[in-house]
């Protein structure tokens, strides 16, 4: 251990840790030492006080719990600009009548302001990393670099854009991989098997393997898509991905509520690292009949990360809500109150989410050598007392507003609820000036057609 001052010392908190079997545990009255963006040690506060390093910055976190920063494994961050615009609609009308006409108006400035607002919302809610799948992603990358959050970014494309859509996605991924001091990772981002042709999916798989890039896409989002795919192609969406070679890549599948039993052996045989992101609030809102089959996927060893999807469908980017809903909906769907437990939900929110976005070796737990993505949660409020079971308190009683401090790569982005890297009032003022032009649908254009 170095004798020069550490960058950051957090003392007096209870720390969520993972044991050698990856079970969730809690270490009381602990101290976390951070140096050069990494966690150097996690130990007893008394022992660190006696022997430990002086630090350039000290946070007294008594009454708080330190968790690994949450990961939003699938979202469309700039879509916060459309929050509440398309309500109470079936999926097809939501896309065709509102979202895709409005997205044909998007400018880089709208994307930038949306991304700023989204990053502010996520940092305040203890999300330290998000996987984004959208357009004008150079702009999103700039916002990420500036505000200090971590992100896994992909430039979305449809086959209707022609070969240049796929090429643009590749060029973005290669240009931004490892930028923002390593906080940005990238993926190829075909939209979905129903908007991207088999030829383009196969080309994406080849490019991914050739360049060592992961792939992030929507697939088997709901049961209707699976039924339509079976009727049209005799294959499920998962089988379409397999035929295209995408299950040989590192693949992040958004939603997967339409994954059916015949897909499970296909996923089990996958030679790449497959993961699924679940965003349960939207499934409830669209009245989809199923949810992500987490129990079946976990039995295959497939990590399921937590997500919010975009705020146009989910209305928020709150991963705390995704965590609680995942636990509740799994209990209801499986008819078993023992699944998913609070500890399992915390595992999905931490290590499994980190794995889902390909960062399982560097984030997702508070342990020596990991990147210092840490949040401090205040459990002194009346709605979180008394604490009989800390995991249950975190999952079912705590709220995103209980996050006091958010740290990414050892840098404090929010201290005592104050955002340090983003000016929300200025962003909101500018965005609201632009809304009339953004939401105008009188032109009759759509960027795409939803027809599954």
Image (cartoon, grey):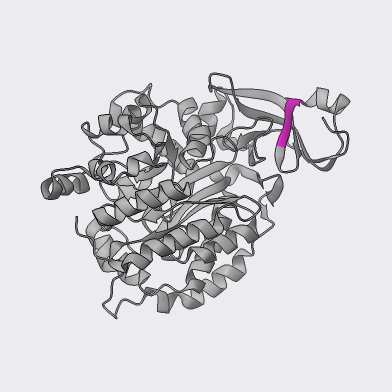
Find the magenta span and give its range.
39-44
Which percent across, then down, holds residue 144? 59, 58
Q: Please identify the residue farthest to the top as the structure is shown.
A: 21
Q: Is 335 within the magenta? A: no
41 part of magenta stretch: yes
Quadrant holding the N terminus: top right
From the viewer's perspective, is 285 left or right of 249? left
The reply to whether residue 90 is visible in this rendering is no
Q: Quadrant of the C terminus?
A: bottom left
Please name whichever residue, 131 or 397, is drawn nearer the observer in this view of the structure: 131
The image quarter containing residue 99 is bottom left
Residue at 41 percent across and 75 percent down: it is 438
Residue 205 rendering spot, x and y as whole percentages: 36, 48
Left or right of 23 on screen, residue 84: left
Q: How many marks?
A: 0
Q: Main secondary structure of the magenta part?
A: strand
Q: Is residue 253 left or right of residue 392?
A: left
Which residue ends up furthest to the front in the rendered image?
210
Q: Position of residue 50 (x, y in %)?
A: 87, 25
Query: Which residue: 27% across, 31% down?
Result: 264
Can residue 238 be seen from the camera position used here?
A: yes
């Amino acid at each position: 251990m170095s004798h020069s001052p550490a960058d950051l010392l957090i003392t007096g908190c209870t720390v969520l840790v993972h044991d050698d079997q990856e079970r969730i545990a809690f270490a009381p009255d602990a101290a976390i030492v951070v140096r050069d963006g990494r966690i150097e040690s996690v130990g007893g506060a008394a022992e660190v006080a006696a022997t430990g390093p002086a630090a350039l910055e000290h946070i007294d976190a008594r009454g708080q719990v330190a968790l690994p920063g949450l990961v939003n494994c699938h979202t469309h961050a700039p879509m916060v600009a459309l929050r509440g615009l398309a309500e109470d609609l079936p999926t097809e009308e939501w896309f065709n009548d509102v979202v895709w006409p409005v997205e044909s108006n998007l400018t880089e400035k709208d994307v930038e302001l949306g991304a700023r607002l989204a990053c502010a919302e996520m940092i305040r809610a203890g999300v330290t990393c998000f996987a984004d799948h959208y357009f004008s992603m150079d702009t999103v990358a700039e916002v990420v670099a500036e505000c200090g959050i971590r992100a896994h970014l992909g430039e979305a494309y449809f086959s209707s854009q022609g070969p240049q859509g796929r090429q643009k996605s590749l060029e973005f991924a290669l240009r931004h991989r490892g930028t923002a001091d390593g906080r940005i990772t990238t993926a190829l981002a075909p939209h979905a098997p129903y908007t991207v042709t088999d030829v383009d999916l196969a080309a994406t798989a080849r490019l991914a393997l050739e360049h060592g890039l992961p792939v992030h896409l929507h697939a088997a989002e709901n049961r209707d898509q699976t039924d339509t795919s079976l009727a049209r192609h005799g294959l499920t969406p998962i089988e379409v991905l397999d035929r295209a070679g995408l299950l040989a890549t590192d693949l992040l599948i958004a939603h997967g509520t339409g994954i059916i039993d015949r897909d499970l052996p296909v996923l089990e045989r996958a030679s790449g690292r497959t993961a699924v992101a679940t965003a349960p609030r939207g499934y409830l809102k669209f009245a989809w009949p199923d949810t992500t089959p987490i129990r079946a996927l976990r039995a295959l060893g497939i990590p399921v990360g937590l997500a919010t999807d975009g705020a146009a469908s989910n209305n928020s980017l709150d991963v705390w809500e995704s965590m609680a809903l995942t636990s509740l909906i799994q209990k209801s769907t499986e008819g078993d109150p023992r699944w998913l437990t609070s500890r399992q939900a915390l595992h999905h929110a931490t290590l499994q989410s980190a794995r889902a976005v390909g960062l399982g070796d560097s984030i997702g737990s508070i342990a020596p050598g990991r990147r210092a993505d840490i949040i401090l949660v205040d459990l002194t409020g009346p709605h979180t007392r008394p604490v009989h079971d800390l995991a249950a308190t975190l999952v079912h009683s705590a709220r995103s507003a209980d996050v006091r401090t958010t740290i990414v790569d050892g840098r404090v982005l929010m201290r005592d609820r104050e955002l340090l890297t983003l000016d929300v009032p200025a962003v909101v003022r500018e965005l609201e000036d632009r809304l009339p032009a953004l939401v105008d649908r009188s032109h009759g254009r759509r960027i795409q057609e939803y027809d599954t």
